[in-house]
Amino acid sequence: MEDEILEHFITLSESPLPYKGIYAYSELLQINPSLVQQIVQEVLSKKDHNMQIPIIRWIQQERILELKDSLLPILDQPTDQDVRIDVLQAAIDSLLQLSNKHTYKEHIPQLQKWLESSYSLPILQILVRYDILPLQEQVNEKIDNLLESDSLQDIIIAIKLIAQSPKQQYTTTLDHLIQHPNRAVRKQAIKATGQLQSPHHIPVLMQLLQGDEMTKEAIDSLSAYGSAALEAIDHALTFYHKSNPNMPLYLCRVLGNIGGSKAQEILWRIVTFPWKEVQNTALIALRKSIQVLDNEQTFYLITDHIERKVKQISWIYTALKIIDGQKSYHYLFQALEDEARVLQHQIGVLYNILKQHISEIPSFSSLGSKVDELRREQDLLSDDNDQLLQHLLPKDLSQKLMIIEGFYSLEEKQKKLDFYYNNNLIDELSITSTILKPSNVKNRGFSRWTIAMTLHVTFDIATPKIMDYFSYYLNSNDWLLIEPALDRLKRYSHFRGFDIASLLKEFVSPTRYNLLMNILNESVKPLTQIEKVLLLKSTRLFSQLSESYLTEIAELLTEVKLTQGEKLFEKGAFLTGIYIIYEGEVLISKSAILKDTLIDRDFFGTLSVLDNQPVDYSAYIIKDAILLKINREDFLGLLEQRPEIMKYIIQLVCSKLRQKDQLSSLY
């Protein structure tokens, strides 16, 4: 019987299908190990790589030390003509993994031979992962030669080798490569820091994020450090001074990737930052990082955040009721509506975290016991978490959420929430005063756009109290807020008969005074940030983006003034940016037949900027025009930093491509 079984497995081992052969070898090892050695050696000597590589990997993965010597004949082949490189790589890798530092020396002559062969580079990719002292000088020399090469491809290969090395002797070299003029080299060097995980590179990666450089690669590499990066991230957020508004967004993504209780603790602090976009990103990161709701503290922390946001929504509903229908407050009304939508979205994210994880609260805790008790009393199914939360949340909070999510009019929602809150709003003055008060800007977290729109309407209610707030905004570094504040101050001084120069001195520092007076004295004034945002909002290209994103895009716009008869570019040109027509007319001509005239708010150049291909049309100015241009590099950089904008643009381009029979899809 045993002979029959043995014969069966021997026959099976001769199968041309690798998985059958490996199964047979595994069974034969238990019965007759010496026979397996003989069979494996025979198969490996046949030079059929389809069988050789699976067997070599099997020996490596199962750590079958008694078959290690079966790999030696592959290394002993006289020339590279006698063995395939993938088979040789697999054999060397397996042999080194099954050996130790004391037995490496037995294989040094063969390894040196292959390291100097035409297979040098593939073998180097294996050897660099092992600390083989006798070969270290030879390996380092080859990496140095690649780094000194004129070929960018060689340099990138060298960086990949450095990233696999267990030693960190190339730390300084990577510092220089991160500053390399070639983007592909920089990208690979940043990736390598995440693989090496030297503490030295944590501040380097933080600096890249601070400078908006190679942010995707820097985020991925910093995330790879895990908890080792948390102290630096916590410090950066603690002393964040808004020099780069994108920095907390990047760090939120890193924290979400790292996860764990410490990362969540930092994210909960970021949720209280007074910037809606930062709050949104932190909440998304929390949703990603919270795998288990394993304590009551997190549950009550989430409910507290929901309560605060419901209170903010109630304030906004009251403000909207007061200014509803007033033409001069139209843009502020829209801005506050957007604020309410953002808050409602944030509440939804927080609620869904509770809904997804409420069943994971440990039964031994008081909240866990209550969960179990409610399921029994209410006869709730294990996945009926909405019903469960209605009983677990404070009763008034459940009712408030039903009001916000319900199909009520704005007035009905405002009245119902007024039952719970006293918002102390009686007129437009109380609204603008609350939004503009500097301490409220920090605590309530109104968006920059909402504050700008509030400044925009203050002319009619420019009380001394409101005017005192102007100093804060005029001395800030945010032009979205400086411009409307300066414009309102100018209108106020003209209306009251004051000298604007004298009035401005009371509000700003001498340095800022000179800058603002130069702006006021310009004969031809450029568009303000607000005007640019409103223009972007009126185009088909950006109409569905929120003002928070549009303000970032507006900062990239430059004005281009052209006269009738000028040719903007010819068919076949590579465009350096996207153009939006502020005023004037542009003729788009693909052929003598296919022509189109673009007017105010139309745009062109999008597809060429995205795919970096020449345009298949020419553009002529047929009426004096002011165009707003977004440079290609700036736009692509923004898309890299803002995945939400990239997603929106991709959807828009796909929609245009579906309309390819229309001329408009050409530009």
Image (cartoon, helix red, strand yellow):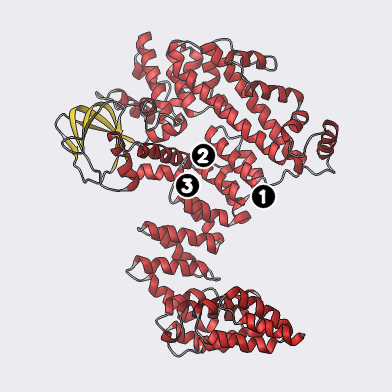
Which label was assigned to residue 514? Answer: none
Q: Position of residue 321 (x, y in %)?
A: 55, 13
Tell me which amino acid carries mark 1.
Answer: Gly
Q: Secondary structure at mark 1?
A: loop
Q: Position of residue 164 (x, y in %)?
A: 52, 69
On screen, residue 544 versus residue 565, left or right, reads right
Spatial CA distance of label 3 from label 2 is 11 Å
| Residue at the image position 38 percent from the left and 75 percent from the top | 145
CB atoms at circles 3 and 1 under 8 Å apart?
no
Quadrant location, the C terminus: top left
Q: Secondary structure at mark 2?
A: loop
Task: Kindly report which numbered mark, 1 or 2, lies closer to the viewer in this rendering.
Answer: 1
Task: Kindly report which numbered mark, 3 or 2, lies closer to the viewer in this rendering.
Answer: 3
> Crowdedness of circle 2 by 10 Å Cα count: few (<14), some, many (20+)?
few
Which label was assigned to residue 260? Answer: 1
Q: Residue furthest left?
A: 565
Question: Taking 567 as reference, is 135 above or below it?
Answer: below
| Residue placed under numbered mark 3 in the picture | 210
Spatial CA distance of label 3 from label 1 is 24 Å
| Residue at the image position 66 percent from the left and 79 percent from the top | 24
> Crowdedness of circle 3 by 10 Å Cα count: few (<14), some, many (20+)?
some
On screen, residue 611 versus residue 1, left or right, reads left
Viewer-side residue, 87 vs 580: 87
| Residue placed under numbered mark 2 in the picture | 241
Q: Position of residue 172 (x, y in %)?
A: 46, 65
> Crowdedness of circle 1 by 10 Å Cα count: few (<14), some, many (20+)?
some
Spatial CA distance of label 1 from label 2 is 26 Å
Instruction: Please report whichever mark, 3 or 2, sits nearer to the chain's N-terminal start.
Output: 3
| Residue at the image position 42 percent from the left and 20 percent from the top | 506
Instruction: Please report whichever mark, 1 or 2, sits nearer to the chain's N-terminal start.
Output: 2
Q: Is residue 472 at least partly visible in the picture? A: no
